[in-house]
Image (cartoon, grey):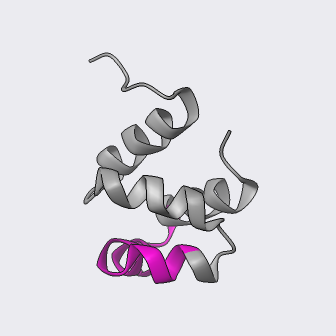
Amino acid sequence: MRSRALNFAFNRALIDPQYRARLFRDLRRTLLEAGVPEAEIAALARLEPRSLEALAEALETLHTGAPTAK
C-alpha cells in the first residue's frame, strides 16, 4: 500500500514541472521532504524511474507487488 505522502508527491509531479524535475534529480531528498516513509523511498529508488511513465509504473509495482502488463 502506498502512503498518502507518496501519492501526493506523484500528483504534484504530474502538474508541477519544477517539482517533477527536482524529483527526478534528487528522488530521495524530495520524497523525504514530502514525508514519504523511508521504506517506500528505498523501494522506489531501486526501480530508478526517470520519466512520469516510469514513475507511474514504479508506483503500480509498489502497490501491487508486480510489474504491470504492457
Q: Residue furthest top?
A: 69
Pinpoint residue 6: horizontal percent, then vertical percent: 62, 58
Pinpoint residue 65: horizontal percent, then vertical percent: 50, 29
Residue at 48% across, 83% down: 29
In magenta, the rendered stretch is: 15-31
Residue at 55% across, 73% down: 31
Q: How many marks?
A: 0
52 shown above or below 29: above
Which image quadrant is residue 36 in?
bottom right
The quadrant in which the C terminus is found is: top left
Residue at 33% across, 71% down: 24
Front-most of 14 and 47? 47
Does the segment drawn in magenta span residue 69?
no
The quadrant in which the N terminus is found is: top right
Q: Please state if 43 lies on the left or on the right of 32 as rendered.
A: left
Front-most of 49 and 45? 45
Pinpoint residue 58: horizontal percent, then vertical percent: 40, 43
